[in-house]
Image: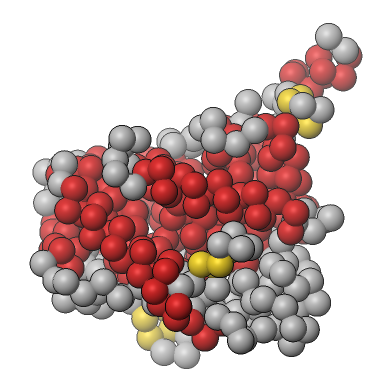
Amino acid sequence: MSRLVVLLLLLGSSVVFGQKLPEKKMTLENMRLANDYFMKTWPDPSQKIVLDKVRTSNLWTRGIYYEGLMDFYRIDADKKFIDYAVAWGNGNKWATWFGVNSRHADSHCCGITYIDLYQMDTTQKQRLAEIKASIDLMLKSDKVDDWTWIDALQMAMPVFAKLGVMYKDDRYFEKMHELYLHSKNIEGGGLYNAKDGLWWRDKSFVPPFTTPNGKQCYWSRGNGWVVVAMVKMLEILPKNSKHYKEYEEMYLTMMKSLLPLQRKDGFWNVSLADSNDFGGPELSGTALFAYGMAWGINNGYLAKKKYLKPALKAWDVMNKTCLHNDGMLGYVQSTGKEPKDGQPLGFDKRANFEDYGLGCYLLAGTQVYLLK
């Protein structure tokens, strides 16, 4: 064993396929720093968010944050994280964003964490009541054209999957798959381009639409949401479930497609196929791709030799380029639907909502921490 390897082991690092894994202590410290910044900024997690209009805090952006926080809790079991999540649910009366009758995926995103918190204490029936009732209304309908944008897959698919597993009821899996197939194959002629192994964000970006430079417009964060949705399917669903292999194939295809699109610095551009369409550092899409790659390595779906370096490169550049000394995250594209939204990005520029970018960062960091 070389002196270098011995030194790295003493520091809490290891070397795999010639790649130095990050020190676990440093990974945790960075994640705690970023998360503490947010918790201090929002001491009351149920406080309404006032920007261009007033929004309740059970909106999708906050749902993504809590999804990341619950993953982070798996490696850093600090009770304050669960207390913070429960306070969020209590403050919103465990309601969905648009109410029980809404079929909108953004309204269901909070349900991912509501279900997790219910499973931690099944005496708290109110945590589950509205999200289950809302999804059950969708089960009773023949309508399957709700998910008209690809972000919806991440916002809602984990909710259907969790309920199906919890109640041992395949109806949740089947309805979810019908909704997914509409997005993939029917909406706008199909939002998935099998030729490139990537997705158009919604039908307005399907050809003949192109970037200003005449290339396909594959939005980074949108494709990142699909990656997370597929990971969650592989994580939640039984491996012998009917559609498991189809989700696995989509996940593996996207990972392969994303690999050559990574920038030399470790980021992915907001416009995946066009580096001249607002190219530059961006955290949220990069974090979601790093999450997908690290998760795949940790769970035996991806080869370390091929995917470890890109995952670590992405994690390293996010910390070096985006993380402030106080925990703020820069270079997060604001909410939107395409590369031009929220531009220009910068180290000192805050996204309009600071929660979802942190959620993406926590998802990625958790899986990087688990690498061996």
- Above/below status of 209 relative to 6: below
Quarter in which the C terminus is drawn:
top right
Locate residue 51, reporting x and y percent.
48, 85
| Image quadrant assignment for residue 182 | bottom left
Residue toward you, 32 or 177 = 177
The answer, for residue 195, to whether it is visible in the render is yes
Quarter in which the N terminus is drawn:
top right
Q: Residue at x 41, y 43 (%)?
A: 245
- Left or right position of 82 against 198: left
In the image, farthest residue toward the right: 3
Locate residue 60, reporting x and y percent.
39, 69
Locate residue 66, reporting x and y percent.
41, 56
| Image quadrant assignment for residue 21 | top right
- Above/below status of 23 relative to 91: above
Q: Residue at x 36, y 63 (%)?
A: 180
- Above/below status of 239 relative to 91: above
In the image, farthest residue toward the bottom: 52
Q: Residue at x 63, y 63 (%)?
A: 196
In the image, farthest residue toward the top: 1
The answer, for residue 58, to whether it is visible in the render is no
Residue toward you, 84 or 115 = 115
- Left or right position of 8 against 4: left
Locate residue 243, reporting x and y percent.
34, 47
